[in-house]
């Protein structure tokens, strides 16, 4: 069983539509793919409709933006009720704050780069969740940078004067919210230090474990061998499962579908605990 439980579509900052993502998952030889767009469930229906034609089973999820003491943390949530009022409200608040924040960043950037808010909207296309990658796309389209990664290494970095924060849930509260909605929370790339200098401390993960966290992502491209070992030890100490994923973003990142995988036993646990079922070709 090849399970890649963490990917993005054009509903957030990926470049494949949900249907294209399902087709790409089939070509990559995956049995199960998790669609986990940032702060939205918008792509679920289109991805589910592509399960039959592609033969790839769909794990429905989202990647919730969280922050603790100004340190960003991403929480994957699986198989929750997408109509749960509290979760719906929090995801909407994140998306709205992200849009405001992107406008603020573009306002700052426009003083030094040939970029306007409309350019970002044009690049975002059908995305309901706006992120720095869409600003990066506008800077690339304007010829200021060759690709997203170059823009992230420059004015879009968290340490840059153009950077603006957005509102995000507290990660412990987010675990409570996800469980209350019948979902199963998994911490995404908990040791990735490529994005920001500070890391979330172990105590926060311990509190998240108390609040229902099921697993940590250990195998992820943003973790080197030392980070994988640290995440593995932390998971063992806290009695958490261990996941792996590609965090595929289409052409927006070099990450390749299936480059890291989730163990089948963890998927079984998530299905046993989650309110929703997998969408399988037999449905
Ligand atoms: P934001 O959530 O708007 O702060 O932007 C963070 C998102 O940008 C992450 O979810 C990544 O998918 C993406 N990202 C981070 N670093 C890079 C990079 N070097 N190249 C492309 N995308 C990136
Ligand atoms: Fe992303
Ligand atoms: Fe993430
Ligand atoms: Zn992701």
Image (cartoon, rainbow, N blue to C red):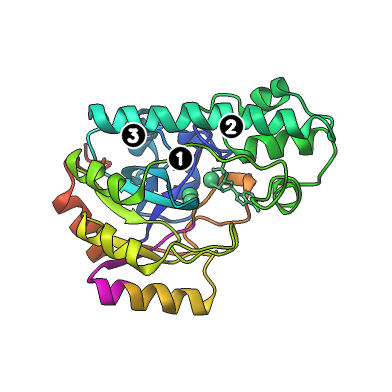
Residue 93 seen by the camera: yes
Which of the image's four quarters has the C terminus?
top left
Which of the image's four quarters has the N terminus?
bottom left
Q: Tag 3, which secondary structure?
A: helix
Report whether 116 appears left or right of 202. Answer: right
Residue 126 image point, x, y percent: 55, 24
Q: Which mark is residue 101?
A: 2
* Magenta-drawn stretch contains 202: no
Along the viewing direction, whichever of 243 and 207 lies nearer the viewer? 207
Please report whichever mark, 2 or 1, sits nearer to the chain's N-terminal start: 1
Along the viewing direction, whichever of 41 and 204 lies nearer the viewer? 204
Q: Which residue is disc 1 drawn over?
A: 38
Please report whichever mark, 3 or 2, sits nearer to the chain's N-terminal start: 3
Q: CA distance from mark 2 to mark 1?
A: 15 Å
Which quarter of the picture shows residue 181? top left
Q: CA distance from mark 3 to mark 1?
A: 18 Å
* Magenta-drawn stretch contains 241: yes
Ligand 1 within 8 angstroms of badge 2 C-beta: yes
Residue that sits furthest to the top in the current view:
118
Residue 173 image point, x, y percent: 28, 46
Q: Residues within 10 Å of mark 2 (few under 14, many from 20)?
A: many
Ligand 2 within 8 angstroms of badge 1 C-beta: yes
Q: Which residue is disc 3 drawn over?
A: 48
Q: Tag 2, which secondary structure?
A: helix
Residue 68 image point, x, y percent: 42, 52
Foreground label between 3 and 1: 1
Q: Which residues are magenta?
A: 235-246
Residue 221 image point, x, y percent: 54, 64
Tell me if residue 130 comes above or below residue 72 in the rendering.
above
User: Residue at position x 63%, y 55% from top?
Assistant: 254
Residue 1 seen by the camera: no
């Amino acid at each position: 069983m090849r399970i890649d439980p963490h990917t993005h579509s054009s509903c957030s900052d990926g470049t494949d539509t949900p249907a294209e993502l399902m087709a790409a998952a089939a070509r990559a030889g995956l049995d199960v793919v998790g669609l986990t767009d940032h702060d939205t469930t918008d792509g679920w229906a289109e991805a589910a409709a592509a399960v039959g034609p592609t033969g790839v089973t769909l794990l429905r999820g989202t990647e919730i933006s969280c922050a603790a003491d100004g340190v960003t943390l991403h929480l994957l949530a699986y198989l929750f009720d997408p109509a749960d009022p509290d979760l719906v409200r929090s995801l909407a608040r994140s998306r709205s704050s992200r849009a405001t924040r992107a406008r603020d960043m573009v306002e700052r950037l426009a003083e030094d780069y040939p970029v306007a808010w409309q350019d970002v909207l044009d690049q975002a296309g059908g995305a309901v969740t706006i992120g720095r990658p869409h600003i990066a796309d506008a800077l690339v389209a304007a010829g200021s940078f060759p690709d997203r990664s170059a823009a992230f290494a420059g004015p879009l970095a968290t340490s840059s004067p153009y950077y603006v924060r957005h509102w995000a849930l507290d990660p412990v509260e987010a675990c409570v919210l996800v469980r209350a909605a019948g979902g199963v929370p998994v911490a995404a790339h908990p040791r990735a230090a490529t994005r920001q200098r500070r890391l979330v401390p172990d105590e926060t993960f311990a509190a998240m474990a108390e609040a229902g966290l099921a697993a940590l992502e250990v195998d992820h491209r943003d973790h080197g061998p030392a980070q994988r070992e640290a995440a593995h030890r932390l998971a063992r100490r806290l009695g958490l499962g261990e996941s792996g994923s590609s965090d595929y973003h289409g052409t927006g990142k070099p990450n390749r579908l299936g480059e890291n995988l989730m163990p089948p036993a963890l998927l079984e646990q998530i299905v046993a605990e989650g309110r929703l079922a997998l969408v399988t070709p037999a449905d």
